[in-house]
Structures are given as C-alpha cells and as structure tokens.
Image (cartoon, rainbow, N blue to C red):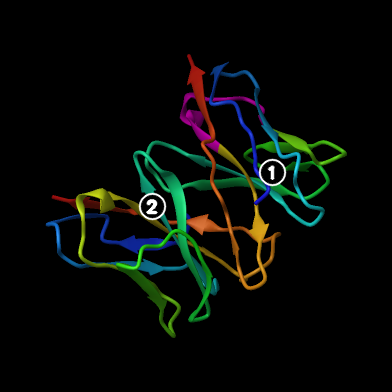
Amino acid sequence: DSGVTQTPKHLITATGQRVTLRCSPRSGDLSVYWYQQSLDQGLQFLIQYYNGEERAKGNILERFSAQQFPDLHSELNLSSLELGDSALYFCASSVEVSCSGNTIYFGEGSWLTVV
Amino acid sequence: DAKTTQPPSMDCAEGRAANLPCNHSTISGNEYVYWYRQIHSQGPQYIIHGLKNNETNEMASLIITEDRKSSTLILPHATLRDTAVYYCIVRVEETSGSRLTFGEGTQLTVNP
C-alpha cells in the first residue's frame, strides 16, 4: 500500500459525459501528479500540483482539468468524454515539488471505461 | 528529457538474479535514475533510485556506472511475483516542477 488513495476504482460512463476522479495523497505529501495509461500510449504525464498550485503540465487535453484543494486532495475532471478517453488514471504524490531525490508514490488507479 | 533505453523483454529463472540494464547516455549531472515496476495494470511501484553511488534496499540493488551513462537494476533472487514491466526513468527537473517520464520499460518474466 503506497498510501495514495484513489476513488472510484472503476467507472463506466457514456460518451459526452463528465466524470471526476479523486485522489488523496500520502500524509505529508504536498505534490500531486496525474498520469493516464491507455493500451496504446503507455504512462503519460498529465499535470502536477504543489500545495494547491499548478506546477507542471504534460499532455493534458483541454477537456480535462484538475485542481488541488487546501486539504491537499486533488480531483481530475474529464468532460465531453470520448471513447478514446478510456484508460487507467493514476494519481501519485511526493513531498516536494522539485527535488530529484525524493520519491513519487503511485495510487492503484481509477479505471475509466467510456461506452 | 534524458532518454532511457531498455530491452523490451527479459526472462529469468526463479531464484536467480535478474539484471535489468538501462542506458541513459544524455543524463545530466544532477538528474537521478529511478526504477519503478508495474505489475499488470496495478499502480507503478517504486523500487529504488540513485544519483552516483550504488544503492541497495530491501527490494533491489542499483548499480550506476562511473560515467553515469548506464545503470543496472539487480533483483538478487527473482520470484514469480517479480514478473512485471520495469521502468528505468531519469527524473526531469524543470524550473517549477518535476515529473517522471515513463518509456516502454522491460517486461521481465520470471519462469519457474
């Protein structure tokens, strides 16, 4: 158990809908990361937050948005869903925003299926 | 990003040492080498990381060459549960954030 908690574990929704994925980081971790893993793309970095502020952005679509709340939990919002958005979405956390020596721990992911 | 190169797959007999190589010839002086593994759609699991010196923990050993252009992850006594995709990652540190950029990894299969 990494200490990173993600909900829901599984989600099935229709095209055009909107979903919210939730992540609780490890206790004491200020940085939260979101990754997407689909069958044909591998693990893709989406976005990083540190103590409520966006810090780094990867291949995140405009239909997707994220935020980190004062209690440090984070939500990833996916809207106007398409079939291609079906994937595993991982949240990860670490203590510091920018320190190559600290460890990033991953949650078990949220399976999103768009039908 | 400092790119890493890993063999796509490797096989290892149960009980033997598994040595997973990684090339990272463009690594910068302050970039760490991280190893993660992913067991069939579970969350990536941290294994070990290092900068210059060899590192060892309860899971594995990391050997980094003196020029830092390559490294080897060693699982001393592989078990069937070590079958997974192993990712060698050079952590990118940007001005305001950092990330782990995953490549294709090495599919390690431990055989009985």
Q: Is residue A5 above or below residue A70?
A: above
Do the residues indicated by labels 2 and 1 lie within the same chain of the protein?
no
Question: Could you tell whether A56 is left or right of A107 in the image?
Answer: right
Q: Chain of mark 1?
A: B
Q: Which residue is mark 1?
A: B57
Q: Is residue B98 magenta?
A: no
Question: Could you tell whether A48 is left or right of B88 in the image?
Answer: left
Residue B4 visible to an observer of this rendering = yes
Q: Nearer the viewer, residue A33 or A106?
A: A33
Element type at mark 1 = loop
Q: Which residue is mark 2?
A: A108
| Span of residues in magenta | B74-86
Tell me the distance, in whole angstroms, between the alpha carbons under discs 2 and 1. 23 Å
Q: Is residue B39 above or below residue B46?
A: above
Disc number lying in front (2 or 1)? 2
Looking at the image, the residue that sits furthest to the front is A62
**Place of residue A19 in the rendered image (x, y in percent of width and height, measured from the top left):** 22, 66
How crowded pointer 2 is (Cα within 10 Å; few <14, some 14-19, many 20+) is rated as many
Q: Chain of mark 2?
A: A
Q: Is residue A82 above or below residue A77?
A: above
**Place of residue B19 in the rendered image (x, y in percent of width and height, measured from the top left):** 67, 25
Q: Amino acid at mark 2?
A: Glu
Choose top left, top right, bottom left or bottom right for residue B93.
Answer: bottom right
Q: Nearer the viewer, residue B96 or A71?
A: B96
Q: Amino acid at mark 1?
A: Asn
**Place of residue B78 in the rendered image (x, y in percent of width and height, measured from the top left):** 58, 25
